[in-house]
Every structure is written in C-alpha cells, then in structure tokens.
Amino acid sequence: MPFVITDACIDVKDKDCLAACPVDCIYEGGRTLYIHPEECIDCGLCETVCPVAAIHADNRLPPELAAWPAINREFFGPEVTGWGRPGGSDPALTTTRDHPTVAAWPGKAAS
C-alpha cells in the first residue's frame, strides 16, 4: 500500500520527505505535497521524517483522513495537473495548482 500526504502538510510543505524518498514519488503543488500512488514503493521513509505527521500508509488512515488517497491520486489526473505517471519528481514538475479540496482548504492561522 502506498503512503499519502494529508491535510497537516497544507501551507507547511516542510520538504524533508522529498530528500528521504528513494524513488522521487513526492511532488510539489501550490499549498501541499502529493505522493504519486503508482510510484510509491511503500518504504515509509517519508513518514519517518515528516515533522507534522502528515504522511500515513493508506491502509492505516484514521477515518477522518479517508479522502486523502483519492486527493493524492487525482492531483496527477487531467482535472488538476494532467501529469499522469511522470516517473519521478523533478523541479520542472512543480506547480502552483492544487487538488480542489486543498485549494479550498482554510488557511492556517499564523502563530
């Protein structure tokens, strides 16, 4: 089962997970990062370095985060980026676009 990035990453994008991922399956959107479900090899390294606990195995998601596998998957589809299966993140594959759920997510209050 692949890992997914959830709402805790919105407006944070720490990016430690990008360096930890051995297959470059994490891509940058406007407000959050996304894991490509077909490229993820289920190693879990990203989960171990995420400082905000935004990354979870899709088969261990709490019920309130159940929508996030689809949000990660749909980010790569024609309705958002149209990237399909790009084969590894690259600076050229960075966008200001987000899945509609993420785009509509309320901003985090400044601390």
Image: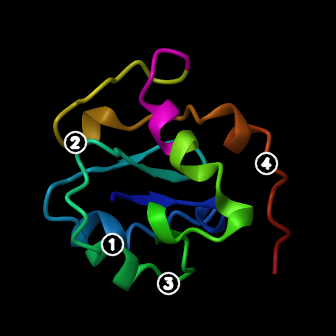
| Front tag of 3 and 1 | 1
In magenta segment, residue 58: no
Binning the other alpha carbons within 10 Å of mark 4 as few (below 14), some (14 to 19) or many (20 upward) gives few
Closer to the eye: label 2 or 1: 1
Give amino acid for label 3: Pro
Q: Determine which quarter of the picture holds residue 49.
A: bottom left
Q: Choose between 73 and 87: the one closer to the eye.
A: 73
Residue under pointer 4: 105
Residue nearest the viewer, comparing 107 with 43: 43
Disc assigned to residue 51: 3
- Residue 23 location, x and y as percent? 15, 56
x, y percent for residue 42: 25, 64
Q: Secondary structure at mark 1?
A: helix
Bin the neighbour count of mark 3 within 10 Å (Cα to Cα): few under 14, some 14-19, many 20 and up.
some
Distance (Cα) linking label 2 and label 1: 17 Å
Q: Which residue is mark 2?
A: 90
Q: Earlier in the sequence, mark 2 or mark 1?
A: 1
